[in-house]
Amino acid sequence: MRNSKIVLLVGLFLPIIASADGISSLKAFYSQTQAMRANFYQLVTDKQGRKVQEVRGIMQLKRPNKFRWDYSKPFEQQIISDGKQVWLYDVDLAQVTVRSLNKVLGASPAALLAGDNNLEQGFKLSNLERKDSLDWVSAEPKDKESGFESIRLAFKDDKLQGMELVDSFGHQTKIVFTALENNPSLNNKTFLFKAPKDVDVVGE
């Protein structure tokens, strides 16, 4: 009788274990996260695994389509979207590039994180093997001109922990998020950009 109780208890927990996967975590992230703020570490390597870039900074997002990535080390750069336009400000070059959001979003990583809930319109989703106690999901862009071959996201308890991206040049980008805040109160002014004086503005 005692052994049968143990088997019964294991059986009750099986559906819960089976439901923990990357796709369900990604969909839960969308339904439960309307805003996010986190520190990030980003490492870019080439096809041979050689380091191309290593940067740190702070990212913030607010749905729909508002996001801000502030790169602080080793160089200063900002990527900001107010939901209509995207600004890329390179402090060292004293240059701002501005483009319409719908021309740069598409099937990009920004669309995955800050876009609407229509994930499967732009991406083919598939579960990956659980690794390092994280649930992984692959989001393959359906648009072959997106500039990305593959995008993978890692979750723990439905909270985003990291991303791995491979672009059309074979470069791999790994992003790790720390000090993550789920649904912080973010002012819309956070996602506005005004070009400083004596800065060249290029684009639309």
Image (spheres, rainbow, N blue to C red):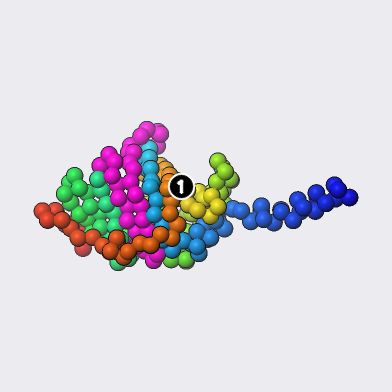
Amino acid on which the number 1 mark rests in the picture: Gly
Span shown in magenta:
46-75
Is 202 within the magenta? no
Could you tell me residue 70's position as x and y percent? 30, 50
Could you tell me residue 9's position as x and y percent? 77, 53
* Quadrant of the drawing holding the C terminus: bottom left
Evaluate whether residue 74 shows in this view. Answer: yes
Name which residue lies at 40% across and 34% down.
Answer: 49
Label 1 Cα neighbours within 10 Å, binned few <14 / some 14-19 / many ≥20: many
On the picture, is 82 further left or further right than 4? left
Is 50 within the magenta? yes
On the picture, is 177 further left or further right than 96? right
Vertically, is 190 above or below 77? below
Location of mark 1 (residue):
162
Q: For the view shown, which residue lies furthest in the left direction?
A: 198
Q: How many marks?
A: 1
Foreground: 30 or 58?
A: 58
On the picture, is 9 further left or further right than 108? right
Vertically, is 107 above or below 58? below
Name which residue lies at 25% across and 42% down.
Answer: 75
Could you tell me residue 44's position as x and y percent? 37, 40
Q: Secondary structure at mark 1?
A: strand
On the picture, is 62 further left or further right than 135? left
Name which residue lies at 38% across and 37% down.
Answer: 45
Name which residue lies at 20% across and 48% down.
Answer: 91
Quarter of the image for residue 194 reads bottom left
Evaluate whether residue 146 shows in this view. Answer: no
Vertically, is 170 above or below 145? above
Q: For the view shown, which residue lies furthest in the right direction?
A: 1
The majority secondary structure of the magenta stretch comes to strand
Vertically, is 33 above or below 47? below
